[in-house]
Amino acid sequence: MPSRRTVLAATAGVAASLAISGTAHANDKKLRSLISRMTLEEKVGQLFVMRVYGHSATAPDQADIDANLKEIGVRTAAEMIARYRVGGIIYFTWAHNTRDPHQIADLSNGIQKASLRQPRGLPVLVSTDQEHGIVCRVGEPATLFPGAMAIGAGGARKDARTLGRIAGQELRAIGIRQNYSPVADVNVNPANPVIGVRSFGSEADAVAGLVAAEVAGYQGAGVAATAKHFPGHGDTAVDSHYGFPVITHSRDLWEKLDAVPFRSAIRAGIDSIMTAHIQFPALDNSGDPATLSRPILTGILRGELGYDGVVVTDSLGMEGVRTKYGDDRVPVLALKAGVDQLLNPPSLDVAWNAVLKAVQGGELAEARLDESILRILRLKARLGLFEEPYVSHGGVTRTVGTPAHLAAADRIAERTTTLLVNERRLLPLDRRTHRKLLVVGADPASPSGTTGPPTGVLAAALTELGFTATALPTGTAPSAATVAQAVAAAQDADAVIVGTYNITAAQKTLVEQLVATGRPVVAVAIRNPYDVAQLPTVPAYLASYSWTDVELRAAARVIAGKAAPRGRLPVPVQRADDPAKVLYPVGYGLSYGR
């Protein structure tokens, strides 16, 4: 690993005067001097944040070398940096970047070494999507917290700040300095397939307070937080990964709803804001996605909201941004709109060369690139990357997944579990009368880095609490034979726990037939709390908002009476037979005292 002296030399001696404690623009003169010495090709590279396969910057597995050659035309992260001089790299589990904390630290160090050894080498801003809940890239033994909607159910800004602080400390320890979290979208559409439980809730002011608190936690720990997805992705029934959503809110409604958490994030000093690949005709009637909209990004975000931090696109590989223009036009149009960082294009070569040619041909001014590079370098300086680009194994051991951090996550989770139905005070279950439990239900793919599957996690947790629990996974769409098997198994149980996941007709049939056995049935919505409206006959219903271990263990403790249900719905649940009417309002939640 290069010494601190090598790093200082590699960054032209500016590190000592680019301290993280400096004001946002105090070092602009020195940063502009750095920019003035960069080649045009280096400037273009600095704008990109790219994926790369492999657990190592220089010696990935052969399968990852093959994937890199196919998608990027290089063998390793080090080769990608040398060829394209990228300013950022994003980690993904599926790209095999995140096996374990010590490996991630080595990968981060290898990336920094590869970049700093280049002529005029600059530190790389390593990022990831560590939202917690259903979207995580760094798994166990790192500390995993409840997701945003669960935090919304807990309602405590202190908990959101603690989440950001602890998660930020752990990310920084493994070399990740930019996190694409928190989600600032206000989820007002129960059918939203892409945001849902990733949002804190449906009330703009409540979301805004939790966003600001989480931002304070992350950035106080030295990690850039990212509010997403501007101008607001909370009211759509289309997933922008696969389609092109249209938000039909009026400008007035946008001001009162979608804009509120982003204004709060900006007031909190948010380091970066991510764009949404959505049409928002009330803000720009051109038909362009917000990512490519100058009226939205420069006119509203920069001009009206006064934001001067880094703007990063959502992934440029998503269908929502590729529908109208080709992959060679998208990065150029994004820069013209006001974007600073171009995230994960389908082809780095196509995107990189398109930007280069746009500058050489006069469509983009080099000065426009310089504006974005200055914002990116300001952020790198503020995060201390010029001074301390490397991390240590000792830091990983001292920080990641410590008993204190794991205990904090468990305490926070206990404040989120929401009791929606409890007829005849079935809950908490008594071990003396309901010792033998059958745990059935949906077993969706486990969120990254958690144990899973949910039925197994719940059964193990309940067994640890003194019950005898047996897991019988039935899936998200159980067949008639599977339902019959579960009903037969229920005959031998004192009570049945059933997990529902975005409830389907087949899941509904399963639950109804279990209730018909006469055995006490406790249902747990392991994703969307809206499931409860479809099951009016269930005598007890809990919402955990996700199927990560920490949330399922908390639900088990509530079922067993080892913890009280303290969560309150952060979204309304409409009636199944009349969606215009509310079954359970925001703020609803039972306790064991009533």
Image (cartoon, grey):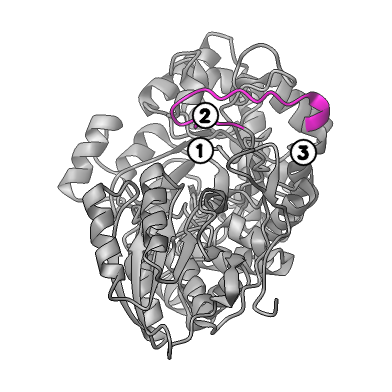
- Is residue 531 at least partly visible in the picture? yes
Give the image quarter of residue 136.
bottom left
Which residue position is annotated with label 1?
193
What's the residue type where badge 3 is placed?
Leu
Q: Which residue is mark 2?
A: 238
Residue closest to the eye, 107 or 212: 212
The answer for how far apart the CA atoms under marks 2 and 3 are is 19 Å
From mark 1 to mark 2, how far is it between C-alphas? 7 Å
Cβ–Cβ under 8 Å for marks 1 and 3 = no
Q: Position of residue 471 (x, y in %)?
A: 29, 69
Choose mark 1 or mark 3, whichever is in front: 1
Reading the chain from its start, which is encountered first: label 2 or label 3? 2
Q: Could you say which disc has been placed on residue 444 in the image?
A: none
Q: Badges 1 and 2: C-beta atoms under 8 Å apart?
A: yes
Q: Number of labelled discs?
A: 3
Instruction: Tell me which segment is drawn in magenta.
Output: 236-253
The local secondary structure at tag 1 comes to loop
Residue at image position (76%, 46%) is 204
Residue drawn 30% across the image and 51% down it: 96
Circle number at residue 257: 3
